[in-house]
Amino acid sequence: MEERYTKSEIKQSERFKARCDAVEALLKEDVCYSIEEAEEIIEGFMKGCV
């Protein structure tokens, strides 16, 4: 089973530091995400903005 993280944990991670604004806007407070899920949500949003 893969690890899941809260929005706050993801936002504070080194991996998402440059995209903390996207994490804040796109992820929900009451949901836990895997790293892959968070990446997919952010990447999907970024691709839609181009």
Image (spheres, rainbow, N blue to C red):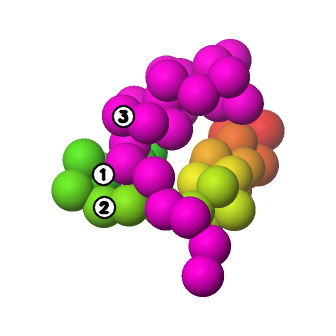
For label 3, the SS is helix
Question: In the image, which disc is placed on residue 31?
Answer: 2
Q: Nearer the viewer, mark 2 or mark 1?
A: 2
Quadrant where the N terminus is found in the figure: bottom right
The residue depicted at 37 percent of the width and 48 percent of the height is 6
Per the model, the C-alpha gap separating discs 1 and 3 is: 10 Å
Under circle 2, the secondary element is: loop
Among all residues in the image, which is located at the extreme bottom? Answer: 1
Q: Three-letter amino acid code at disc 1? A: Lys
To which residue does mark 3 refer? 8
User: As drawn, is 3 to the left or to the right of 46?
Assistant: left
* Precedes in sequence: disc 1 or disc 3: 3
Quadrant, the C terminus:
top right
The residue that disc 1 covers is: 28
Circles 2 and 1, Cβ within 8 Å, touching? The answer is yes
Q: Count neighbours of disc 1 (C-alpha within 10 A) and say few if under 14, some if 14 to 19, many if 20 or more.
A: few
Question: Could you tell me how far apart the alpha carbons at marks 2 and 1 are, in whole angstroms?
Answer: 6 Å
Q: Is residue 32 above or below residue 16?
A: below
Residue type, mark 3 in image: Ser
Q: Which residues are magenta?
A: 1-25
Residue 5's place in the image compared with 13, above or below, is below
Q: Position of residue 37 (x, y in %)?
A: 61, 64
Q: Is residue 12 magenta?
A: yes
At 30% from the left edge and 51% from the top edge, which residue is drawn?
A: 28
Can residue 41 be spotted in the picture? no
